[in-house]
Image (spheres, grey):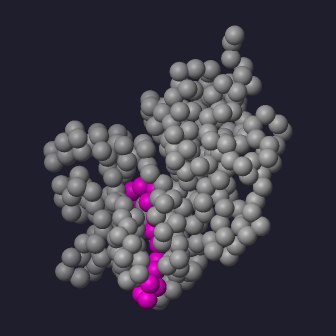
Amino acid sequence: MALTEFSLIQQFFADATQKRQDVIVDIGDDCAVLSCPADSDIAISIDTLVSGIHFFPDVDPHTLGHKSLAVGLSDLAAMGATPAWFTLALTIPSLDEKWLSAFASGMAELADQHNIQLVGGDTTKGPLTISIQVHGLVKKGAQLQRNHAKSSDKIYVTGTLGDAGAALQKRLASWQPEELSEKDWSFLNKRLEQPIPQVNISREIQPFVNAAIDISDGVLADLGHILEASGKGARIYLGKIPLSSSLQKLDKAKAWQLALNSGDDYELCFTVPAEHVQALETLNLDIQQIGEITEEQKIVLLDEQGQPSVLDITSKGYDHFV
């Protein structure tokens, strides 16, 4: 039997993810009906990925399914929210069963890791576009926000920065420095196409954090959102920026440019009061302190000798309309 819009949903998505007890009505009705615990609020975020803008048209559909959900989970992590439910609006040019199966599989594998259930959505025909709205639960009054950074807070990031940006530059500009091997490029490309949302680290750091954001447009741009919302500035130590072993092979200035300005990392940037630093670091998480919040409303970069850096930081991160 030929696929239709509704049989497509039943075949590939209705049972793609684990079932949660707080889902009263899910896929198959006009609306999903969800039950929220009395002591929690709901955090909601939506992201749209467009072929040729957010991903290459020839990307593996399994990794695309993963990334499509990962970007929303990263937003929930930045708010300190536990993933619960998501909806999917999928526009596809044709009914390709092999593609749909791989896409749904990649999405479902990540969903199962975080116990988040697909509860509804829509499918239409047109240029490949994916919109996912995620919903998470956060204890009342415990959400992390951008506007709570305080002077003398220490600035931290998770993971390593700039890896996805390096892979993207190679794809866009045929940039392939001799220092990087095929193994390096394989690692960097995986960081671009299958980012790991830092939901678990978010849960651990939440008691110690004043302000947080996920790094989707480059750490300078995203930290800038924290600073603007909080009315503060920052001092960043370039030598403390965490770089993967692959990026460490590059010229330092190039590696720092990638780490500071590249998007698609989907790591977290957050600020911590000095009195909480010791307790935070006893957790032995994959985090690195890179600077501190200041009163003067600008970002100052310091080199490895503690001197103001001449590194070009004119890039403000990715903007769809600039």
Which residue is pictured at 22% across the width and 38% down the height? 182
Please state the horizontal and vertical placement of residue 119, each as a whole percent of the image.
71, 43
Please state the horizontal and vertical placement of residue 273, each as a whole percent of the image.
46, 85
Image vertical order of residue 24 relative to residue 262, above or below = above
Residue closer to the observer: 246 or 200: 200
Q: Residue furthest left?
A: 178
Q: Which residues are magenta?
A: 261-276
Q: Is residue 187 magenta?
A: no
Residue closer to the observer: 30 or 313: 30
- Res 255 → quadrant: bottom left
Total marks placed: 0
Q: Is residue 38 left or right of residue 167?
A: right
Whether residue 41 can be seen here: yes
Q: Residue furthest right?
A: 30
Q: Is residue 203 left or right of residue 137?
A: left
Q: Residue furthest top?
A: 1
Whether residue 299 can be seen here: no
Which residue is pictured at 70% across the width and 27% down the height? 10
Please state the horizontal and vertical placement of residue 253, each as a whole percent of the image.
23, 63
| Quadrant for the N terminus in the image | top right
Residue closer to the observer: 161 or 159: 159
